[in-house]
Image (cartoon, rainbow, N blue to C red):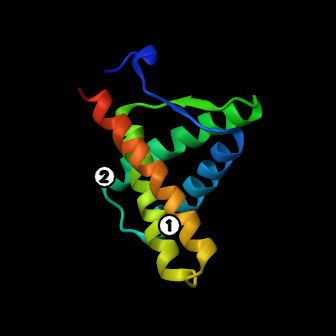
Amino acid sequence: MERPDDKPVLHLSHNDLGIVASIITSYLAYLQWGTPASPKRNEEIAHLKSITVRLTFVLSQREGCIPLTTQEIKALGDALHGFVTITRRIVARSRERDETLAQIGVLRQHLLRMLAISQN
């Protein structure tokens, strides 16, 4: 088990943390209502809800970083990937959509690097 001070920390602007919170909320709705129940899904939902609670607190304090466990990094990366996939299916292609999704992809790559570093 990781000690709190050993957790990787995600540093984002206050605005970006708010965007991540919105993405997680949207993806949670999809997981809860659009996917079959399973232990893996329930675990992912629990991790994302934990992140959301902490994000809400961080946003209320006007801070810009949040410590994450490796499981939470995985869950957040999966949520970002899922959000991008769903958005590509339901939102008409546009330059704005593609730029936004590309930026989410950059954040996901950053999370994957954090995960790789934390596992070494």
**Cα gap from disc 2 to disc 1, whole angstroms:** 15 Å
Q: How many marks?
A: 2
How would you rate the neighbour count of disc 2 (Cα within 10 Å): few for under 14, some for 14-19, many for 20 or more?
few
Q: Secondary structure at mark 2?
A: helix
Q: Secondary structure at mark 1?
A: helix
| Residue 9 rendering spot, x and y as whole percentages | 49, 28
The first of marks 2 and 1 along the sequence is 1
Q: Are marks 2 and 1 in contact (CB under 8 Å)?
A: no
**Which amino acid does the dot numbered 2 rest on?**
Lys
Image quarter (top left, top right, bottom left or bottom right) of the N terminus: top left
Image quarter (top left, top right, bottom left or bottom right) of the C terminus: top left
| Residue at image coords 52%, 38% | 50
| Residue at image coords 55%, 53% | 24
| Residue 87 rendering spot, x and y as whole percentages | 52, 73
Q: Hey, which quadrant is residue 7 in on the image?
A: top left
Nearest the camera: 68 or 38? 68
| Residue 62 rendering spot, x and y as whole percentages | 75, 31
Q: Is residue 69 above or below residue 4?
A: below
Q: Is residue 24 above or below residue 117?
A: below
Instruction: Name the side, left or right, on which 46 lies relative to 95.
Output: left
Q: Which mark is residue 62?
A: none
Q: Can you identify the residue that label 1 sits on?
A: 30
| Residue at image coords 38%, 35% | 114
Q: Can you identify the residue that label 2 sits on?
A: 40
